[in-house]
Image (cartoon, rainbow, N blue to C red):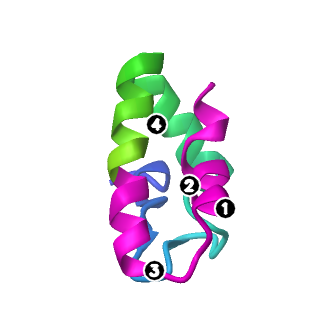
Amino acid sequence: MTAEAEHLPTRPLWDCRVCGRRWPCEPAQLILSRGHGQMDLAVLMWDYLEEAARDMPHTPASELFDRFLRWTQ
């Protein structure tokens, strides 16, 4: 397994397992964007947003949108 593959979220806070930044961190964004077209990436990240919303119910929806979806555009 490469170091790239390890940039995954640790739940329930959704921080990166490798760098500790909010996931998806920049390395995770690069990996995800390389492996998916724009529409597929947006759908995937929407799924992650929904999971994160369940794990972090007090986080504002706008913050989750910015974190999980805005960068996919």
> Toward the viewer: 6 or 62?
62
Dot 2 and dot 3 residues touching (CB under 8 Å): no
Chain-order first, disc 2 or disc 3: 2
**Residue bearing mark 2:** 24
- Which of the two discs, 4 and 3, sits closer to the camera? 3
List x then y, in percent, for residue 25. Answer: 63, 56
Magenta stretch mostly in which secondary structure?
A: helix
- Residue 25 has which mark? none
Chain-order first, disc 4 or disc 2: 2
Say few, some or many: other residues with alpha carbon within 10 Å of mark 4 (under 14 / 14 to 19 / 20 or more).
some
List x then y, in percent, for residue 67. Answer: 63, 54
Q: Amino acid at mark 2?
A: Pro
- Which of the two discs, 1 and 4, sits closer to the camera? 1
| Callout 1: SS | helix
| Callout 3: SS | loop
Chain-order first, disc 1 or disc 4: 4
**Residue bearing mark 3:** 57
Chain-order first, disc 4 or disc 3: 4
Q: Which residues are magenta?
A: 48-73
Confirm whether the magenta stretch covers residue 71: yes
Q: CA distance from mark 2 to mark 3?
A: 18 Å
Dot 3 and dot 1 residues touching (CB under 8 Å): no
- Residue 63 has which mark? 1
Instruction: Identify the image quadrant of the N terminus.
Output: bottom left
Dot 1 and dot 4 residues touching (CB under 8 Å): no
